[in-house]
Image (cartoon, coloured by chain):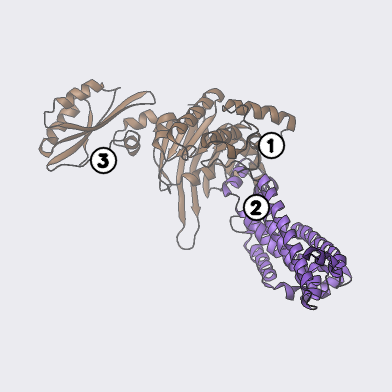
Chain colours: A purple, B brown
Amino acid sequence: MSWWDALLENDIIRERLPLATLETLEMVAVSSVLTVLLGLPLGMLLHATSPGGLTPQRTVASVVGFVVNVGRSLPFVILMIAVLPFTRWVVGTTLGWQAAVVPLTLGAVPFFARLAESALREVSPGKVEAARVMGSTRGKILGAVLVREALPGLVSAVTVTVVSLISFSAMAGVIGAGGLGALAISYGYQRFDTAVMVACIVVIVVVVQAIQVVGDAVARRLDHR
Amino acid sequence: MPPAHIELTALRKVYPTRGEDVVALDGIDLAVPRAAIHGIVGRSGAGKSTLIRCLTVLERPTSGSVAVDGEVLSDLPEARLRSARRRIGMVFQHVNLLDSRTVAANVAYPLEVAGVPRARRAARVAELLDLVGLGGRGDSYPGQLSGGQKQRVGIARALATEPAVLLCDEPTSALDSATTRQILALIRDLRDRLGITVLIITHEMAVVREICDSVTLLEHGRVVESGPVGDVVAHYGSRLARELIPVPDLPLGDQRSLVEVAYTTDDVATRDVLSAVAGLGAQVEIAAGTIETLAGRRVGRLQLDLPAGEVDAALVRLHAAGVHAEVTR
């Protein structure tokens, strides 16, 4: 019996691995979309209000910056437990991948906002100045110049964030989110089933690689420098 | 005299800082007539960048006014200013094209901002690219172009909304000398064809020599010298004349002096200057010299190396020959 057959013979792997993979993909996909939807405007706000931004606002910049830093400095394990009441209020339960989306998104938004801010900061101020001289409104500069020119960097930021979300999602498995993390912990760690542990790791590695490859390809396609 | 096309009146810009205020522009008066090419020169920190930012009112002047084509821009509210800026085309040292857009889409950008319908934009963009000698390159990305080609796109973009004034901020400072000449020739050609008024900010005297009709020297935020290039070079002792017709700084021998001779052929022919110099005697050497034709005027500057004891006699004889001469060292 080869090792491959041994893997397929393992009931846990055969029955639970596909489902766990699907759960992980679902919670990561939904929280990634929410993270970008919330984090990009936040990153734009951080950039616009910073000194030298489109509308420098010292107070707004420092308040938003402080909130983002607090969010980033909380370890995810603690954050996800701390927000349990909020999760229950939003989703109605604290169990399942749907519930995990709440702490995952809350954890990733400040992280992505900072990455988005630095991608926007990479756009040379000369381009913004040129757009202003040509009579652009601030909205036009934000969309057609800043975000569009920063797009390759923003795509890379999304890639990094999605990969981090996969890692966070394994932690969420500890408090009942399901997915590959939960499978690896309950069978691989608590029941010493090494095959399950290895299978989970392999799937995660493959998923992360795939995301990185796709993300890099998209960023390259968008980059005309 | 026709009314000035660009007019700066008592323009001041002060940056308040903790401690002492920084005066970037200290009462600039400047008038540029329609279809002229005017150069603004000065060392870094002289106020050139602040001046151009005040001209486009990206910075509000502290006091004084900026008028373009008869309209006072410095008083306009922000919304009106946005449309007023369309009458100013601007060319930048680092071009500042959008890398994510094709050449055609870059040139179309100011037209989008101005609300020109899509169908009209395409025709105008093609026309503009032909105008700057880049017809057919519309689908390229800026990253695929050379520095000179990028600047041509920058110029096409600046002209898109048919501005009355073209502001060029160090347009050739990032280019090699052959490309610089091509870009300057293009700017002159556009002025001739479109009748546009051009203001060029530069630290390169070669740019002034090549295309400017008139020039202003800024220092510490003030106008030090200003005038038509032909007149400025005829003020032999002036800073601009020295920088436009430079002679090298020379090592000086023991008991020797340097006398600088300057003339324009309006006053005296080069051959007469040279024979006057030759008449000074065997001890007098021409150590360096420049003869140029600037703004239709032939001007020359010579550096004479002679024994210190003969200086006074030499000056008398040179002045008698109708030549400007002064001891430099």
Q: Which mark is residue B114?
A: 1
Dot 3 crowding, Cα within 10 Å, few <14, some 14–19, many 20+:
few
Tell me which label, 1 or 3, sits earlier in the chain: 1
Which three-letter amino acid code belongs to the residue tagged 2?
Answer: Gly
**Residue B207 as seen in the image, left or right of residue B115:** left
Q: Say if A142 sits above or below A193 in the image.
A: above
Front position in the image: B213 or A120: A120
Q: Mark 3 falls on what kind of element? A: loop
Residue identifier under label 2: A153
Q: Tag 1, which chain?
A: B
Q: Are marks 1 and 3 on the same chain?
A: yes
Of tags 1 and 3, the one toward the viewer is: 3
Which three-letter amino acid code belongs to the residue tagged 3?
Answer: Asp
Residue identifier under label 3: B249
Residue at x-position 26% and y-position 31%:
B289
- Name the quadrant of the N terminus of chain A: bottom right
Task: Give the alpha-carbon distance from disc 3 to disc 2, as whole Å.
Answer: 51 Å
Of tags 2 and 1, the one toward the viewer is: 2
Of tags 3 and 2, the one toward the viewer is: 2
